[in-house]
Image (spheres, coloured by chain):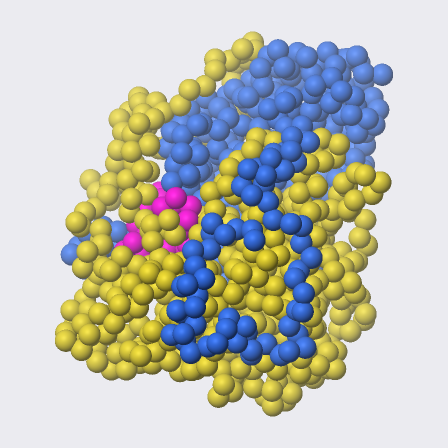
Chain colours: A yellow, B blue
Amino acid sequence: MRKEKALIFELGRSGRKGYSLPPCDVPVKELDELIPHKMKRQLSLDLPELSEVEVIRHYTELSTRNFGVDTGFYPLGSCTMKYNPKINEETAALPGFTRLHPCQPESTVQGALELLYNTEQLLKEVTGMDRVTLQPAAGAHGELTGLMVIQAYHRTRGDHKRNKVLIPLSAHGTNPATVSMAGYEVIQVPSDARGLVDLEALRAAVDETTAALMLTNPSTLGLFEEDILEIAEIIHQAGGLLYYDGANLNAIMGYTRPGDMGFDVVHLNIHKTFSTPHGGGGPGSGPVGVKDRLASYLPVPVVEHYGGRFVLNYDLPDSIGKIHSFYGNFGVVVKAYTYLRMMGAEGLKQVSADAVLNANYLMNLLKKTFNLPYDRICKHEFVLSARPEKKKGAGAGDIAKALLDKGFHPPTVYFPLIVEEALMIEPTETETKETLDAFAAAMEDIAAAIEEDAGRVAAGPHTTVVGRLDEVRAARNPVLRWRESQDQ
Amino acid sequence: MGGEHYLPLTPDDREKMLEAIGAASVEELFSDIPQKLRLDKLLQLPPPLSEPEAYKHISSLAGKNISLNDMPSFLGGGVYDHFVPAIIKHITGRSEFYTSYTPYQPEISQGVLQAIFEYQTMLCMLTGMDVANASMYDGGTAVAEAAIMGCGATRRSKVLVSRSVSPFYRHVMESYFRSRGLPLEEIPLRDGQTDLAAMEKAIDSDVAAVVLQQPNFFGLVEELTGVSDLVHEHKAVLVAAVDPLSLPLLKAPVEYGVDIAVGEGQGLGVPPTFGGPLLGFIAAREKFIRQMPGRIAGETVDVEGNRAYVLTLQTREQHIRREKAASNICSNEALVALAASVYMAALGPAGMREVAELCLQKSAYAREKITTIKGYDLLFDGSYFKEFPLSVPGDPAKINEELIRHGIIGGLDLSSYYPELDPAMLVAVTENRSREEIDRFVSELEGWK
């Protein structure tokens, strides 16, 4: 099973060709006439030389060394690894979209603008917000955009003392990183015994320096923040704004909306909730929705519809400016629009119903064998603690590796930080009951294997193309690129 | 109900699962949502479409656009109509790649990890830099983050950016810098290039980084001799935004003392797609590795000593360092980086050089032809790569409207980005433009009144 794969630089032969270009059909000038010698490259360009079939075989083999949602169950908590409908790939590949330049005259891109406009309307309704920008290219980019909007709002009002953003300890790592990027200070808010935001601690933390609270609801524990209205009141009374991290929106579509809970700014992860593929780490898309009083701060341009024409409006004097060179990841938005139009209101509600049903069902199966620190109804995901298994010699990370041998992608491990040895499991709505049963059975097998021989489990995985990797070596002696000398 | 084919649970499954949970209904599973927050009616969305209906509707929207397949285009400004080899979509369309997430479990993600490692290597080969990351959202955010890297590395806050850097990038930088409260100063133009005398005056011990573009936004190859010495004398960082397709011909960033090379990689086999997904890249000298944002793949071995790849140096990243991370970036443009890798692998050094030479020759041909027409003059003297700015004899938007009527997508109207140059147009000519198309463009410009 185990084998190394040659790097592309170790393949091919000098003089091989993997492309076909037309001959030059204009009169050719001497290169020196066009580019002075001193501006010319002297450094050799050592890219590999391969025939087309070699390129195809190389990357095809690489693909077989990779696991996607199409390969199997991928319950990676907080990532919403649902099935990616194939029709989305077809619509996004239409040349009428892919072969559009972003600076074409508006008259030539009316269909693209209509699609952006329509998507905004659909996302407004799903979230309960008044305006949505589609410009952010990923969730974290959306977070930064949202905080910039909040910052611009406070600054425009002359309220310059607000320099802190509150974040629960259970938040995604992007939240505190975004707060720093926007020049704010992070204030951590603890959770209470229920795993929810500790209201007393929140009250004590807010003051006239609070710019916002960033909250994921349901939280990363998969628990709905039941006190959300009170939380909103505490923040708003202190003059702060409420920011919704939409990573977990898949749990509540059609049941409730962040806009109705009192959130002022919302970001969505199109590549989670709205079925677009994660691409091995992008491209994603992270639209940001706001309430009316914040609409004038959105990035430019916004898409508007006047007298039968769709236009890009750059005339927003309070705008935070631009956060992407153009209009964001349009191609990803096409996929989400396709999904939204196919699902409709009932379909989206059923998505959340089944996502929550699948999570609760799997949680109930697994809590018989594993420790469930917060034993209550969950939403789309739940978090187990492998602390007891860790004591026996195989922790959350080892359980993850053991799942690889069972043909499953593991859950998110060691996150959220408030649960020791966390295993964060999100099955999504697109999985069958049989898959959930099989996953639960695999987890029970692993628990039994830990009882029997924890050492063997901790030495896994045993069947993957490579064994457990030496991550410490990678970090201590970084080899971040291939060099010809290294293997010769 | 829409989307039933994506929802495998049957009514019978649901009943059995509820029974196992001990819940009477699915609604019970939502009882933790306060009653007053629960929607009492369905969302107001258009009725669901079946797959053929959805395809028809969305095709009709695509059909309302005029695409680069319908008309030859002379638009550039950072996004170009370059040749995209057919093999790319067949690789990026492998669902083991596109339906995977960030490779957090390396043993089953060797495909994506090795592809990232190879991509990093290819970018280093192109730029001459030591390290590259797995990708950024686009050229604009890559430039902004590179400037912030400079602030981190020098512990200074002021950044100088040339007015010859793409306005699309500068606008993104402005938003990032305004938010952080960091000063951003513009170096003015002189004959379409960075005014080096002004730069020399502006640079002092508060300056963290100087940001230039090569070729610059106007397509001019800037005369940058001595610039890196000046920047380094002040212990500041030199950031250059470069067009990767120009690098087979033009000096590699390492050859003129650049510390961080960034830019937009869309030309590397990625369709323009109305401006996104694009491909931001960052490559740097080794000493800047700790300030590098985003994912980096590294080589290691497994327990048996097999060579393998893993995400590394993660103590820079948000999921480990939280508020102390180098950046908040998480999802990036991994699949687009894969497309760029396949492009560079297929073209190799000879193919990439051929593309660069075709762009150079064809744009030179177009420039020579157009500037013989009365009213169309080259704005600045100098050496150009694949685009060039023209003063035009009327409102560029009107000229472009007229060109569309004659089946041509004209150049970029510069009026809103450089009002001081108005009326002007930036014309890009890639390897995809035939002589016949260029000649037709020339004769339409000639006929415009």
The answer to if B280 sits in the magenta stretch is no
Residue B19 quadrant: bottom left
Total numbered labels: 0
| Frontmost residue, B29 versus B129 | B29
The answer to if B98 sits in the magenta stretch is yes
Camera sees residue B148: no
Where is residue A106 shown, x and y percent of the image?
A: 74, 35
Where is residue B322 shown, x and y percent of the image?
A: 49, 69
Seen at 48% across and 33% down, the residue is: B269
Camera sees residue B300: yes
In this rendering, would A303 be left or right of A60?
right
Seen at 33% across and 38% down, the residue is: A59
Magenta-drawn segment? B95-124
| Frontmost residue, A459 versus A151 | A459
The vertical placement of B43 against B401, above or below, is: below
The vertical placement of A56 against B107, above or below, is: above
The prevailing secondary structure element of the residues shown in magenta is helix
Seen at 75% across and 43% down, the residue is: A312
